Amino acid sequence: MKANVSDLATTAIAPVIWGSTYLVTTEFLPGFSPMIVAMLRALPAGLILMMIVRELPSGIWWLRAFVLGALNISIFLGMLFVAAYRLPGGVAGTVLSSQPLIVVILASLLLSSPVRPSNIIGALVGMGGVALLVLTPSAALDAIGVAAGLAGATSMALGSVLARRWRPPVSPLTFTAWQLTAGGLLLLPAVVLAGQPIPVPTITNFLGLVWLGLVGAALTYALWFRGIGRLPPSVVSSLLFLSPLTAVLLGWSLLGQTLTVLQIVGIALVIGSIWLSQRTNT
């Protein structure tokens, strides 16, 4: 399958917006637990979309919706926020950047997609670029945070590959509504068992949750699943490198952070890895 430029650009919007997650989480939601943030990001957005599409799953798709909701939403978002709260942004971004490489491997096993050397090289180059972008000499490792990041990357990689394999018989918006709702419902027991009350949101908290839910989940997942259905898995997954790139550029433009020579090299490597992956499939 060839990568259409229009589909590529539309799908790329999702990881670009996801690049704001770390900034919004740490600056707008500092008093919220990871599971509460994950649940509040997914469930309200899913229910709003369900009211819009007004279409429930049928037959085997009830089970598949909850499996994909668990992989792409519950486990991924839960582990993402655990990593975000326990690791410096650079370490979290580097660990999560392993997802494109995991997708290449899983797509080979589950979709019989060929493992091209250029795809492996592109994924490794992208990870190297992310490391240059976000790692600092003082970055501290936390075992739980690193494990959570790897678990989250693997979970969404598997969910993305299964979404491509199963091919939903509905629009990307309906498919997104099913998964966000199922994923949010599956997060509720984790929130209850954690025993942490949901803080009364301030205006700042509310704005952060609206951004993460309506824009960073409802809109972006619809674009992402549309891309999964139209583009090769290695091309879609390579776009995830845009998330840490966006995070660094946001820090530079909004927080007054400086860009080092190594970070500029990292930007070039990230862009090069995406170009290599896209070029391999055209």
Image (cartoon, rainbow, N blue to C red):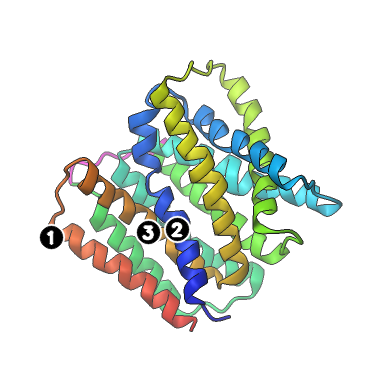
Give me the residue at 44% from left, 75% from top: 119
Q: Amino acid at mark 1?
A: Val
First along the sequence among labels 3 and 2: 2
Residue that carries the numbered disc 2 in the rendered image: 13
Amino acid tagged 2: Ile
- The amino acid sitting under disc 3 is Leu
Graded by Cα atoms within 10 Å as few (under 14), some (14 to 19) or many (20 or more), the crowding at tag 1 reads few
Q: Disc 1 designates what residue?
A: 261
Picture coordinates of residue 41, whole percent (x, y)? 53, 36
Q: Is residue 162 above or below residue 75?
A: below
Which sits earlier in the primary sequence, circle 1 or circle 3?
Answer: 3
Which structural element holds mark 3?
helix
Q: Residue at x 49, y 72 (%)?
A: 6
In this view, the residue in front, 241 or 195, is: 241
**Nearest-to-viewer mark from 1 and 2:** 2
Q: Earlier in the sequence, mark 1 or mark 2?
A: 2
Bounds of the magenta segment? 137-144
Q: Secondary structure at mark 2?
A: helix
Q: Determine the CA span between mark 1 and mark 2.
A: 26 Å
Residue at far right of view: 59
User: As drawn, is 136 to the left or to the right of 100?
Assistant: left
Instruction: Classify mark 1: helix, strand or loop.
Output: helix
Q: Is residue 281 left or right of residue 226?
A: left
Residue 189 drawn at (x, y percent): 65, 26
Residue on which the image places disc 3: 242
Asked if residue 158 can be seen in this view, the reply is: no
